[in-house]
Every structure is written in C-alpha cells, then in structure tokens.
Amino acid sequence: MRLRLSGLALAAVLTTTACSKPPPAPPPAPAAFSIPVVAEGHGVMPPQTAKISAKAAKGAYTADVAITPTWWANQGQFKLVWYMGLSQVKRFFNVANVTGDPGDRPAWIKDPETGIRQVQVRFDGGPLQTLKPETARAEFKIPAGAKAVTEVKMDFGSADSPQTVDWK
C-alpha cells in the first residue's frame, strides 16, 4: 500500500512539474557602463586615454593623456568636473609617453583642463546631450524618469582635431 501511495505522489509531482510553464527569461544584463542618477551620489570615472598629437615648430609633439573626471548627480543635475585647482591637475589628467621638444608643448597640455572641447552624455541609452564647456565642468539636466548615465564622451586636444575618449 505504501508503494502505491508513494508512486501516486511521485506521479502527481512529475505531472505537475512537466505541465508547468517554463521559467521566465532572466532580466537583461545591465549596461557595461552605468552611473545611477536616481539618488544623489558622486564618484570618479575610470581612466580613458587619448593619443594626441600637435604640429610644432620643431616637429610633432605627441602624448598619451589619461582623463579621469569626477561625476556628481544631485538636484536634478548630472555634473562632470575635471579641474579643482592646480594641485589637482594630475588627479584628472595623467600625461605619459611624450615625444617632441618640451618648448613645443601646446598650451592645452600645459593646462590640460583647457583641452576639453566638447562633452556628451547619454541617459538610459537615449540621444546624446552635447555641451561645449566654457569652464572645467559640464552640467546636464537629468531627464524625467532617467535612471542612469550610460555613455559619456569627451573631446580632448587641439581645437582643430581633438580626440574623443568614450565611457560606455
């Protein structure tokens, strides 16, 4: 008798399991680059490197410039900052692999915060918002319902041929 009841119970479980719906698909993976903007916060973006070159009196001047801006999300604004006084320049810009005469160094390498030509930000995969900064910061209004910044682009270098660094 016990074997029949055990067999019936096992058959009921197997039938129920076999007839149930398949498990739901897992949610999509989050974006590789994502800065939340639903709550106030701040942080430092990972470094991205621009390989820049400039024509100079004694030939070409080239360098690799790693850029690490800070970000702030508060009061409906998303802010990127890349200058907080002379003592902080190396925190935001790391210049390496320099070739060329030091006397030919462009002004935007001496003071790299002046070399940011354009900043673009994308919220939740939407269209890019663009700003040509006049100071060493860029402020963007967070769109209603936006949850995260999913891409940031900065153009750095000479005014006629800047290089784009992209966080996405």
Image (cartoon, rainbow, N blue to C red):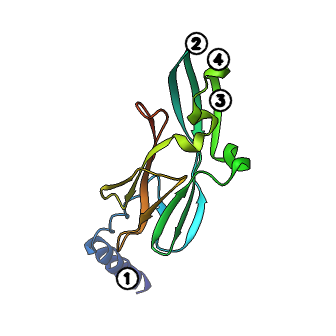
Residue in the foreground of this view, choosing between 83 and 58: 58
The type of residue carrying mark 3 is Ala
Q: Which residue is mark 4?
A: 101
29 with respect to 12 (left or right): right
Q: Earlier in the sequence, mark 4 or mark 2?
A: 2
Location of residue 18 by image quarter: bottom left
The residue depicted at 40 percent of the width and 31 percent of the height is 160
Q: Report the disc number at residue 9.
A: 1
Residue type, mark 1 in image: Ala
Numbered circle sitting on residue 76: none
- Alpha-carbon span between mark 1 and mark 4: 85 Å
CA gap, disc 4 to disc 2?
A: 7 Å
| Residue topped by disc 3 | 96
Q: Quadrant of residue 89?
A: top right
Question: In the image, is 95 to the left or to the right of 154?
Answer: right
Residue 58 is marked as 2
Q: Residue at x 58, y 30 (%)?
A: 64
Expressed as whole percent of the image width and height from the top left, the position of residue 35 reads 49, 61
Q: Earlier in the sequence, mark 1 or mark 4?
A: 1
Residues packed near mark 3 inside 10 Å, few (<14), some (14 to 19) or many (20 plus):
few
